[in-house]
Amino acid sequence: MLTLLLIGFPLLAALTLFLAKSKASKTIALGFSIAEFVIALGIFALYKHNPDACQLWFDVAWVQSLGIHFNVGIDGMSLLMVLLTTFLVPLIILSSFQNHYNNAHNFYGLIFVMQMALIGVFTANDGFLFYVFWELALIPIYFICLLWGGENRGAITFKFFVYTLFGSLFMLVGLIYLYNHTNVDGLKSWAINDLYTAGRSLTEIQQSAVFWLIFIAFAIKMPIFPLHTWQPNTYVNAPTQGTMLLSGIMLKMGTFGVIKWLLPIVPLGLEKWGATAIGLSVVGIVYASCIAIVQKDYKRLIAYSSIAHVGLISAGMLSGNQQGIQGALMQMLAHGVSVVGLFLVADILFRHTGTRDTDKLGGIRSMNGNFAVLFLIIVLGAVALPLTNGFVGEFLLINGIYQYKSWVAAVAGLTVILGAIYMLRSYQNIMLGERRDSQIAFGSLASSDKWVLYIVCIVILVFGIYPKPLNDIAEESVKIFLTNLK
Amino acid sequence: MLGYTITQWLFGILSFLAIMFALMVVFSRNPVNSVLYLVMTFFCMAGHYLLLNAQFLAIVHIVVYAGAIMVLFLFVIMLMNLNQDTEPQRTWLTKIIAGVAGGLLLFVLVGSLKGTEQLQLQSYGASQIGLVKNLGKVLFKDFLFPFEIASILLLAALVGSIMIGKKDIK
Amino acid sequence: MKGLFIISGLGIIAMLAEIFKFKKLLLPIVLLGIVAAYAFNFMEWNNGLSISYFDNMIAFDKMGIAFSGIIIATAFFWFILANDYFEEDNNTVDHFALVLFALVGALMLTSFKNMTTLFLGIEIMSIPLYVLAASKKKDIKSNEAGFKYLIMGSFASGFLLFGIALVYGATGSFDIMQIRSFISQNTASLPLFFYVGVVMILIAMCFKVSAAPFHFWAPDVYQGSPTLITALMSTVVKTAAFAAFLRLFMVGFAGVSEVWTGILAVVVALSLIIANFSAAMQSNVKRMLAFSSISHAAFMLMVILANVRSNLSVDAIVYYSLAYSFGSIAAFGIVYNVSRNGNENIEAFNGLAKRNPAMAFCMTVAMLSLAGIPITSGFFAKYFVFTAMIGTPYKWLLILAVITSAVGAYYYLKVIIAMYFKDQEVETQKIKVEMSQTMVIVLTTIVTLVIGIIPGLVADMFKF
Amino acid sequence: MIKLIALVPLFPLLGFLINGFFGKKISKGLSGSIAAVAILASFIVSVLAFIELQGSHQKENVINVFSWINSGMLKIPFEFLFDSLSSLFLLIITGIGFLIHVYSIGYMHEDEGFSRFFTYLNLFVFFMLLLVLGNNYLITFVGWEGVGLCSYLLIGFWFKNTAYNNAAKKAFIMNRIGDLGFLLGIILIFTTFGSISYTEVFDKAGTASTGTISAIALLLFIGAMGKSAQLPLYTWLPDAMAGPTPVSALIHAATMVTAGIFMVVRSNVFYSMSELASQTVAVVGVLTALFAATIGLLQNDIKKILAYSTVSQLGLMFLGLGVGAFSSSVFHVTTHAFFKALLFLGAGSVIHAMGGEQDIRKMGGLSGKIKITFITMLLGTIAISGIPPFSGFFSKDEILAHTYEHSKILWLLGMIASMLTVFYMFRMLFIVFFGKFRGTHAQEHHLHESPPSMTFPLVVLAALSVIGGVLGLPEFWGLPNWMHHNLDEVIKIKNPSLLSHETEWTLMGLAVASAAAVFFFAYTLYMKHKVLPVEKEEQLKKWQKLIYNKYYVDEIYDMLIRKPLDAISTAFYKFFDLQIVDGMVNGVGILVKSIGSVVRLAQQGNIGFYVISMVMGIVFIVLLTFLMK
Amino acid sequence: MINGISINYYLLLSTVLFIIGAVGVMARRNSIIIFMCIELMLNAVNLLLVSFSTLHHDAAGQVFVFFIMAVAAAEVAVGLAILSMIYRNVKSIDTDLLSNLKN
């Protein structure tokens, strides 16, 4: 029931905002999002460790005749993702306090619709429901980008939409194929476990087919190397909050999907094609990192860096061992937080100086020391320095990949070096040295921005030093997951 | 004579004429001529109907087609005074293509009609089915609904052609 | 059945209206009549078949009632939508009559039992439409549309009749059930020309539902005809044609499915490709919707193809046509209002989000529904098709469908983008939409969403 | 006290936090003293703990703080290992750290980044302590990366200067290269032994195959190369001199750079088990020693000279490790910490006196002006030159003796390296402190001895570097080698020296003699003939040019790595990503359009055509049915 | 009075007529001729139906022909009306002139 509330509440928020059309949408939205976060914390409190089944589940028949159920519940992984989502959305809303969008109420309303869909994706235990939420998440973000985006957003959001839709249609086919093979005493079923059993009953050929059908969708969402080209443009052109949603949370849909909706379903397919997928991911790491090195637009740089990170994540989880998957989970959380921080920084830079070009900026550190420190902490989080939350995940990931193949890990590990290169280079160009352009002035931060940055930094450090609370959940859920996989 | 019964002779001649006239309809340059040829074709068909013991139908056929429809055609053609020299012609290429298409269609259809067992059309001394009485029974028993509903059809056609035909009073 | 008579009666009343000077009352009367027809229709749903005297010719079984329900409902909305269209024309009465007669034909198609009724139904539906398509007398485009529709239509009926004749020749009957049983009794000894007959009928029906390669008339006619007539064609007519198709082949010729399924597969593939790819190129919205209707036709055909022997297809198609009809009604209603100034191109939609947010929203929903995005009904419709197809040997068709629907999203989005994104260059004068029309559009949109969220409402109804 | 060992890193952390948050608000004196006191406190704690350890029989103490990362069988608690090795390093770090903090109070007092400086410094000490205290490789790695960060921050301390920033960046990235090796090493250890905590791993070491062991050892050594500036990853260290001098003293001479040695000594088991690995270490070490020493010969920047000498000294230590003289290397680390810190601080004091001038060509005759500095630096120089009985002599001699026993060639190279050391150290000394002053008048006027806060550390360190030798007196003198015994239980596999006393005597004699000889050579060159380094590069001979420009290594790296990387990246972005990958995607769109425009041609409006195509369709389909039947 | 004629011949005949009609529709540009050709096609069907009804001794076939006639009449009425309207607008009934709607 609480889970239902978790999903329903944002919808309520959205409706209120749509209908209220009030001037104070910002604050209302913030209030709602915080309340939502509180609910999530409540669930976190109720969560029993080492669960044998998923908890707080809520299940009603949706379309009886088709075996479609509205079946949601919380297991370890979804709990983590829900926490991430509910934690980030308030930050994102808070971060928007300095930009003034017209029809703000619609803007925030859409954000909440998005949150609803995302939570749905993370908690769904019914294949069909999962897909519906999956698609649903696409629509609000599409409109957010289309309505409040930057230059020639039309073409770019368009590409984004069609591209992702293309992927998810294949996923739909894949899921239906599985559904068609389910057999619960004569009836078909969409329940996740039935899909698991159905998937494993398939032959290797069939599994390979299903693997690709479904993986394509996830790969596009993440995105994995050759399917990534929608992403940088979209990130750059979307309004900052949209970018945050995309990179902070929506990206996780893909990775989460792989863990929950791909690995358990097609073990044979994974055996056959996992190598290919991992290969692509690893190539993506190096490739994207290299590209990030030569980026001038800071937002675009972050976009590419995010491709690199997600490449590592996917390589880790596809290697399919405890460390790999757990690392992936931890890294999703870490990346979610730090990338939001980075994009906010980019936005702040743009707002204060009117440019994001790393060659034009410079010498800002001498104008605003605090900002420099906060920025630095986030950067360090992004390069996964120990005692930042980035490190735990990255270590586990590389560890997991190493157990898959040592040399692959060596290649993937290059992110350690390349990451340092592009992050520090850009940091130096933006913050250090003498200011290049005399009219660039950088005053003190607005309090809202300051708060977001503070929170982000605190989280980065705290969960870098003491990741236990999250890490335990991740560990046990992955343990259970793997035992079920056997 | 020549081993063919009279009916077979009749059939042959009628068929030949029908096809001839049909071709003329298609190929004659002057619309008016085509109309007349078409009328001739219809007469041949009426002949066939008679051969097939569909006497009533034959009459109706003449009345409706030759008597009404074709007159209508003729009427319109006169109205627009179309004649040989106003007659637009397709390019030979399209004509040929059309011919080929028709030929192919003929080929496949005929090919498909082959191989049916030789069902002889037997004649009963008094085959009544073609007569008004009989037809009326069938029409007003089994086919009552279509018969009724056909009125709607005609009504629709009526209204439609009036609506199209009449001048708009502004 | 009673519904059928009521509507025919309405048609005749409509004709009298001019004479007895109650034009103004006509619309209310018609609407009432339609509601009544719907009510009777609904009652028959519960207490079985009605007037049994015509059973051999026409009988409203559940499937027939389901389809005629959709048709009548759509017609109801259509009439409200069209009221001001009638105003501006001085052949109001004739229009009313013709549309109502067309409806009669459509209803016949949902529940014929005999080739005669099938043929008459088709013609009764088509002939008024020929006229209506051409009803803008001064507009040469409209004339051309009507003319093309007429020629192609009667050409197709020629083939239909030829097919019927051959089938009659082989089976010695026009009655669907008798044909069915005849087939099942002597499958082996059917003469070759019987199959040709079936194929010819198939072709004619494909023409009626405008599936490639017999679709050529559709785009031209849709574009040329007055917008609301196009709406009528793409909803009522299509639904009826499908009902006919379904009955004819799922009931009549199910026995010889191996003959026509292959053909159908090819037809579907062609339609998907041609429709979606040419739709992507269109700048005229009506024309685009025409092509989109072709691709939807392909989808519905897929359902028939998928469950030749199972019976899921019925509710799948019913749901599909419902979703599609309501989506298109909303879409065309908006197109009609947006293109009042004669500009039917996508540019006409620029900045609609500013000029009339409500309409923009409805159009968005309609487009998403046609594109098949959750949580609109269009999604479930597509979903049904996919589920139906996945078990069949026609998986390649499924993949093709997926790819082409991605292409489909491409052109539906063009409209959305125009409405929300291209708002700079357009002068932002508001677009007024009549209260009644707004009601219809909003209502259909709501239905689209509701049965999209709770498809059970509809989908579970037609399990038979 | 041992139970409370966690306090040792805690104090600097507190210092860091206080300075970090309130540094701007409180006065310079206060923030400086807070930092210094923090270190002092942890020094005291470590001394107490050290004494307690010496007393107690339990030499390995594991103190668990909290459980950090758990993942399946991979359990990484946050726990400390306090044994003789770590205790020794604690003393060095906190002790010298304290002195340098004191020194810095004087040295930095004009700088506006004063409190920031101490913040970083405390943070550094904290991480360094983590590094040596950690009971598993990952904690060590945490400290390892942490000190890297701090060195990055401190090298780029004057962040307005782009050159400094580049130096900082270079340092960080080069370290990262090493760190990757280290990380992979750790993971390999985990996958082999199922654990990464020292106490468990070394006991299981026997179970693994030699191949694996070598792999582990080499991977770890890559890490060491990065951190301890060995070939080929050494180039960052000279550049790191961009940081304030105390930083160079603390981080880039005394403590951080010796982390590599520490780590190798920690994992000595692996190295003594793998011939290959130890060979590599030795060779790399000696080559580095020689290479850096030669470069040192012709440098004119006082800090650069010291930097290269540091590199070469580190090389020497690795040589020691390579030949299995672990304790000797640790011994040398200690003594080196003393005298190199001393030298750097001295140099700092000189620079301070010269008002920021670092070029020895501008100096000269300072001996009279700044006596304390001069004397202390003289002592330091003697110590590093290995002239008995100063500390450097003993430690260096031990290493060389072991090397001789191991391989003559390595020994010879080592000897040459140390002789070079003697030369360039005295060259520096003579040129800086003797002859006549060559700077500007302003500078001459400005010359003055540094404040006591700076001289005090010098004196202390000087004392230490004089008497430091007592920690490891040669055994064959019949004297106790404390260092050796102290590390007994840390070095799992012993290889005691089997040399006869005669040989040892001769070696020692040789060492002293060679040192003396080189000294006199330098003396004659720079005192008698007053030779001075040339003003312009052009006046150098070819081979001199080569050395003067550090064998162009930086340029080569630039050409081999940085430029290609940028080129490739640009190619990836401009060509591959935008053209090909994205091109394909857009290509699909174009394909759709083109197909569409082809298909729509069929729709050409003419009924005749429509009908024909329809008939054709029918023909086609009917044929199809026949083919099917 | 008929006997000894295989149904095939009637099949053949009506097919040929039907196709002649089809060819006419394809090959002519004059709308009216096209119409007449369509009528021809319908008549071919009529012939077929009648022959079959004789074959089966079943009147239904002939009854069906009535309906076809009715429909034909209706179509012609409407068609000619439309044609005359078009003629009013463009002073021609050449199909090639009626190809503005395309692509």
Image (cartoon, grey):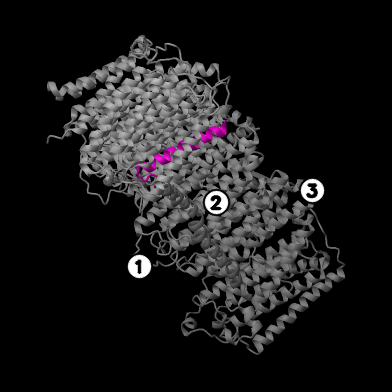
Disc 2, SS:
loop
Would you call the spot at circle 1 few (<14 residues within 10 Å), some (14-19), or many (20 or more)? few
Residues at discs 3 and 2 both on one chain: no
Q: Which residue position is annotated with label 1? A: A438
Q: Is residue B140 left or right of residue D34?
A: left
**Chain of the residue where label 1 is placed in the rendered structure:** A
Q: CA distance from mark 1 to mark 2?
A: 34 Å
* Residue C151 seen: yes
- Identify which residue, C70 or C428, lies in the foreground: C70
Q: Which residue position is annotated with label 3? A: D206
Quarter of the figure with residue C371:
top left
How far from the left and from the top, in percent, is residue A99? 32, 49
D566 over D591 or under it: above or below: below
Quarter of the figure with residue E70:
top left
Q: Is residue C287 left or right of residue D111?
A: left
Quarter of the image that includes the N terminus of chain C = top left
- Identify which residue, A200 or C260, lies in the foreground: C260
The magenta-colored residue range is D601-629
Q: Mark on residue D471? A: none
**Can residue B128 be found in the magenta stretch?**
no
How far from the left and from the top, in percent, is residue E89? 21, 42
- Residue occupying the point 64% across, 79% down: D546
Q: Which residue position is annotated with label 2? A: A384
Main SS class of the magenta portion in the image:
helix
What amino acid type is highlighted by mark number 3? Answer: Gly
D495 over A88 or under it: above or below: below
- Identify which residue, D98 or A392, lies in the foreground: A392
* Residue D133 seen: no
How far from the left and from the top, in percent, is residue D577? 50, 56
